[in-house]
Image (cartoon, rainbow, N blue to C red):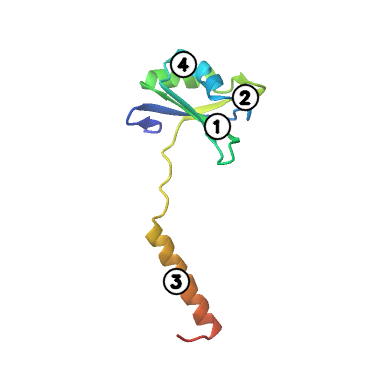
Amino acid sequence: MLGRMSEGFQLYIGNLSFKATVDDLRELVEPYGATNVGIAFEPSGYSRGFGFAMLATQPAAQAVIDALDGAPMMGRKLRVQHARPKAAEPSKDKADLRKKRRAANRMRGSGETR
């Protein structure tokens, strides 16, 4: 089930203003029982324009979606939905193997020998 995490139900909250703070987002979702709220930031410190909220139950999560999806916040319409699990990144070993294969193919194509 989308959005179901070990601690509860995680929601994605997108199209946030880049000026929105964690406190702004917390103030918006805490009345629905959100226990953990955060905004994604770039390494440079700039907001990525989306965040997450954790709710204990599916009905509470659905109440947030029903109330806030499309709602205005700081001049933008929010996009609220169940969070999807983060896609697994390829293992380092597979990436290294691909690099070695590409290098070997380049050497074969150039007529070089080992």
Q: Earlier in the sequence, mark 1 or mark 3?
A: 1
Residue occupying the far front of the picture: 44
> In what quadrant of the picture does the C terminus appear?
bottom left
Q: Label 4, secondary structure: give it.
A: helix
Q: Nearer the viewer, mark 2 or mark 1?
A: 1
Tag 2: Cα neighbours inside 10 Å, few (<14), some, or many (≥20)? some
Q: Earlier in the sequence, mark 3 or mark 2?
A: 2
Tag 4: Cα neighbours inside 10 Å, few (<14), some, or many (≥20)? some
Q: Earlier in the sequence, mark 4 or mark 2?
A: 4
CA–CA distance between discs 4 and 2? 19 Å
CA–CA distance between discs 2 and 1? 12 Å
The numbered dot on residue 50 is 1
Q: Which residue is mark 4?
A: 30
Q: Label 1, secondary structure: give it.
A: strand
Callouts 4 and 1 close, C-beta under 8 Å = no
The numbered dot on residue 77 is 2
Residue 75, position in %: x, y? 67, 22
Q: Amino acid at mark 1?
A: Phe
Q: Nearer the viewer, mark 4 or mark 2?
A: 4
Q: Amino acid at mark 4?
A: Glu
Q: Nearer the viewer, residue 32 or 69?
A: 32
Q: Residue at x 49, y 22 (%)?
A: 65
Q: Is residue 110 above or below residue 76?
A: below
Q: Classify residue 27 as left or right of residue 36.
A: right
Residue 36, position in %: x, y? 42, 24
Q: Nearer the viewer, mark 3 or mark 2?
A: 3
Q: Residue at x 42, y 50 (%)?
A: 89
Callouts 3 and 2 close, C-beta under 8 Å = no
